[in-house]
């Protein structure tokens, strides 16, 4: 008859014979398994708890190629369906239900199509809209309490809707904007002055504009399927190549200090893919990786501390992440985060906002149809000590040079800071009023002088009417 003890004994003997056979084959060289060393192999995504989400957001129905959400260490911003063209700016430390009538930035006559926080002054944000204007706003300390309709400055030059807004990574108050008029414009925001007008380079609608690591170059993607490298001071295109053969939107991101560039797009058969390029030799990509057959536009993000490239697709719940290396095959798939809720937009928060003592290497915000969900990417470690290899010095949020120095031809790498809690020194926060004082143009100054002269004339007339002699100045 069948005996359980006999069965277990036979199973043990079979396992032991298998182990011995395996050892013998390895000794003969018939079995070999190479495991690539990687400090980020076990990175996983930890979504926030339900009570930590931001819910019941009435999103704007306007469509664009933008990511629909941006954030810094204090706030995040999303376009909402309140007023004509409204942007809600919400405190990150206040999760829960959005108010039915949130305080918004409401100055555009059409929808807000793209926006960007100033990387050096977290209380400043620039918006581009369907009304062809770019506006710069100040956010009061503590966040928006009331709806603001008067921006700090208005930038007028584009002839059609503004679809991309990107701040310079190292120069203070320098911003690039792109429009459906097929131009890219580089502004000195503080002087309200257009410094470079890049026209005649792009033949169709611009889809993305990104700055290089030190801001010495711009890369653009366009509906004509071309990716271009452009000098932001002269406006000259230094390279031009067909990045992807598909007709759908292509997005870009520079890959940190390596100088390499990543483009995401579609094949002719509508398969999603990404390519890695060396800007010094753009004839062909270093590598091409096909991902899947899906319709959603990919949004790329790169973390310099871990060399992880994150790709999130609009309309699906997946976020794939790859480790990038400095030689062939250039990339390795680490894992993918899958969720049931589809993604409308994504943003990566600054590195200095992560929780280093819990080995949180990346913090992202995922925008769904009516909510914002924080996502933490964790690299598990047994030690409770600060992990220097996971957290090298990171972007400090401090300008490396002035706008004047940049337009004079100077380049500087970003200012870095330690993330070690024992060494970390965060920069003091500046209010919007002290961070940004727009300089008036000659025409604006003359207008102010004319107003003052008219006011003085009115006062002199009142005094003389009452028989009060006004002394000569």
Image: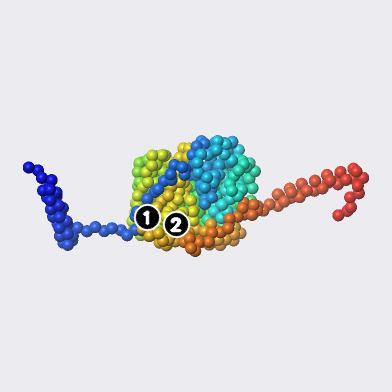
Residue 310, x across and y down, in percent: 41, 50
SS type, badge 1: loop
What residue is disc 2 on? 356
Counting residues from the start of the chain, the first of labels 2 and 1 encountered is 2
Q: Is residue 91 visible to us here?
A: yes
Quadrant of the rendering where the C terminus is positioned: bottom right
Residue 463, x across and y down, in percent: 88, 45
Residue drawn at (57%, 61%) of the image: 401
Q: Are marks 2 and 1 in contact (CB under 8 Å)?
A: no
Q: Is residue 8 left or right of residue 335?
A: left
The circle drawn on residue 380 is: 1
Of 279 and 311, nearer the camera is 311
Residue 423, x across and y down, in percent: 49, 64
Residue drawn at (38%, 39%) of the image: 340
| Marks 2/1: CA–CA distance | 11 Å
Q: Mark 2: give few (<14), some (14-19) or many (20+) Cα within 10 Å.
A: many
Residue 428, x across and y down, in percent: 58, 58
SS type, badge 2: helix
């Amino acid at each position: 008859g069948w005996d359980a003890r006999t069965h277990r004994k036979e199973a043990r003997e079979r396992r032991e014979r298998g182990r011995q056979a395996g050892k013998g084959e390895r000794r003969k060289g018939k079995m070999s398994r190479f495991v690539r060393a990687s400090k980020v192999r076990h990175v996983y995504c930890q979504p926030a708890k339900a009570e930590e989400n931001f819910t019941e957001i009435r999103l704007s129905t306007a469509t664009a190629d933008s990511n629909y959400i941006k954030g810094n260490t204090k706030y995040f911003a999303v376009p909402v369906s309140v007023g004509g063209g409204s942007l809600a700016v919400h405190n990150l430390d206040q999760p829960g239900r959005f108010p039915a009538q949130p305080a918004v930035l409401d100055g555009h006559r059409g929808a807000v199509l793209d926006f960007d926080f100033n990387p050096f002054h977290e209380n400043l944000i620039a918006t581009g809209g369907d009304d062809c204007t770019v506006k710069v706003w100040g956010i009061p300390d503590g966040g928006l309490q009331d709806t603001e309709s008067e921006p700090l400055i208005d930038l007028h030059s584009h002839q059609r809707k503004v679809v991309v807004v990107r701040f310079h990574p190292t120069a203070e108050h320098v911003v690039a904007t792109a429009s459906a008029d097929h131009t890219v414009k580089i502004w000195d925001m503080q002087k309200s002055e257009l410094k470079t007008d890049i026209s005649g380079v792009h033949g169709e609608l611009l889809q993305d504009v990104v700055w290089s690591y030190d801001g010495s170059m711009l890369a653009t993607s366009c509906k004509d399927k071309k990716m271009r490298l452009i000098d932001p001071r002269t406006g000259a295109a230094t390279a031009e190549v067909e990045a992807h053969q598909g007709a759908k939107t292509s997005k870009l991101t520079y890959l940190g200090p390596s100088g390499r560039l990543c483009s995401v797009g579609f094949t002719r058969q509508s398969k999603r893919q990404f390519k890695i390029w060396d800007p010094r030799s753009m004839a062909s990509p270093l590598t091409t990786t096909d991902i899947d057959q899906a319709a959603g536009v990919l949004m790329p993000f790169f973390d310099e501390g871990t060399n992880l490239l994150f790709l999130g697709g609009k309309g699906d719940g997946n976020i794939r992440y790859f480790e990038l290396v400095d030689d062939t095959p250039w990339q390795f798939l680490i894992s993918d985060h899958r969720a049931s809720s589809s993604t409308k937009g994504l943003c990566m928060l600054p590195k200095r906002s992560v929780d280093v003592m819990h080995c949180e290497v990346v913090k992202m915000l995922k925008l769904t149809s009516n909510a914002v969900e924080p996502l933490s990417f964790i690299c598990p470690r047994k030690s409770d000590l600060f992990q220097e290899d996971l957290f090298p010095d990171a972007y400090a949020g401090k300008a490396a040079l002035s706008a004047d120095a940049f337009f004079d031809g100077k380049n500087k790498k970003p200012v870095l800071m330690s993330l070690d809690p024992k060494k970390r020194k965060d920069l003091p926060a500046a209010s919007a009023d002290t961070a940004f004082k727009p300089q008036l143009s000659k025409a604006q100054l003359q207008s102010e002088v004319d107003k003052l002269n008219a006011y003085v004339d009115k006062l002199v007339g009142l005094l003389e009417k009452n028989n009060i002699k006004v002394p000569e100045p």
